Amino acid sequence: MDRRKGIFLVITGAVFWGIGGTVAKKLFQQYQVDVDWLVTVRLLIAGILLLALQFFGKDRSQILGVWKTRRTAIQLVIYGLFGMLAVQYTYMASIEHGNAAVATLLQYLAPVMIIVYVCLRKQSVLTRRDLFIVSLALLGCFFLLTNGSLSQLSVPAPAVVLGILSGIALAFYTLYAIPLLKQYDSLVIVGWAMIIGGTALSLIHPPWQIDFSGFTLEAYLSLVFVILFGTMLAFWFYIESLQSLLPKESSLLGSMEPLAAVVTTVFWLKEPFGLFQWAGTACIIGMILLVALQKESSSRRNQHPGNEKPLRVS
């Protein structure tokens, strides 16, 4: 029963993440919601809710304890600004200029960037499997962005640039969090990072400065979905799934996120998606699965299922 619950939670969370990006695109298109405002509100509310989960369900002393050490506090601020805020803003901005499918798939190039970074730092040797993963990602990216034509991009250039920046930010987000997660629960780290990022962005676009006069019930429900389901519940479900599943299994099932983003973008928002773009999608999802399997085989873990808690950000 616990295992079935874990599978249900991780698939549901991944689907929420994928659909959340598509719903955000609808808010940008139909209701002219400003991306700065949406990211600000999304981060602030989701961050507060995640810390509330920690307060009522786990070790509440960690919520303030993370600020007691100067070094840890500085790391958390850097992580909130250059990790959480950077990845959330570039991801949403890429969706605004393009679509959720392409933005999500480009963000998922982060594992390749991490492989390249680690090899450049000479912390690891580039294996044949690594080369295959990188080649698969590059081929998928080429098909996704060109739809097989060298003469033009299938999505606007700003969406491509922002999507790649989102992948770079996600790579930093993943690597920089490692020492913090060794000391504190992921709900604490991610919750505070969201609040830090949202607070910083609110200086540019205060959350109360928005005109709701053109909002319909659908618009309000879409906002609730993006903030509650597409951010807070999605992350919580993913973390909870690790109590009954191996991290490898959660990572593999988490690949439902880009698939959900593609399917909802194509069939709900009616965005054009060519044959080569579907081939590119298959390449990138295949790359995600290979990376997840590689993590499992390289660690040779004999740990309990919940010992590692990979971060999710979408």
Image (cartoon, rainbow, N blue to C red):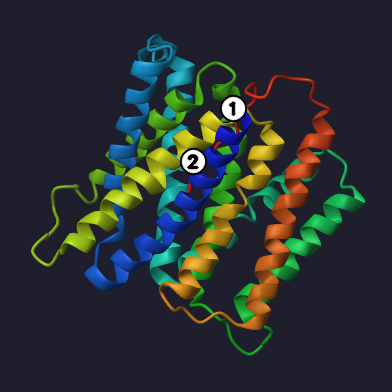
Name the front one of labels 2 and 1: 1
Q: Residue furthest front?
A: 1
Residue named by callout 1: 2
Q: Give residue 193's quadrant in the image.
A: top left
Q: In x, y percent, where is residue 142?
A: 69, 74
Q: Which of these two is toward me, 260 or 2?
A: 2
Q: In x, y percent, where is residue 188?
A: 43, 24
Q: Quadrant of the N terminus?
A: top right
SS at mark 2 in the image: helix
Which numbered marker is on residue 127? none
Q: Is residue 294 left or right of residue 278?
A: right
Query: Label 1 is placed on what type of residue?
Result: Asp
**Would residue 99 be seen by someone viewing this image from the given angle?**
yes
Residue found 65% across the figure and 67% down from its top: 281
SS at mark 1 in the image: helix
Q: Is residue 190 above or below residue 29?
A: above
Q: Which of these two is toward me, 256 or 310?
A: 256
Residue named by callout 2: 83
Mark 2 crowd level (few <14, some 14–19, many ≥20, 10 Å Cα): many
Query: Label 2 is placed on what type of residue?
Result: Gly
Sequence order check: which comes first, mark 2 or mark 1? 1
Residue found 53% across the figure and 48% down from its top: 14
Q: Give residue 3's quadrant in the image.
A: top right
Q: Is residue 4 above or below residue 265?
A: above
Q: Which of these two is toward me, 240 or 143?
A: 240
Q: Is residue 280 left or right of residue 60?
A: right
Mark 1 crowd level (few <14, some 14–19, many ≥20, 10 Å Cα): few
Q: In x, y percent, where is residue 196?
A: 34, 34
**Would residue 123 be seen by someone viewing this image from the given angle?**
no
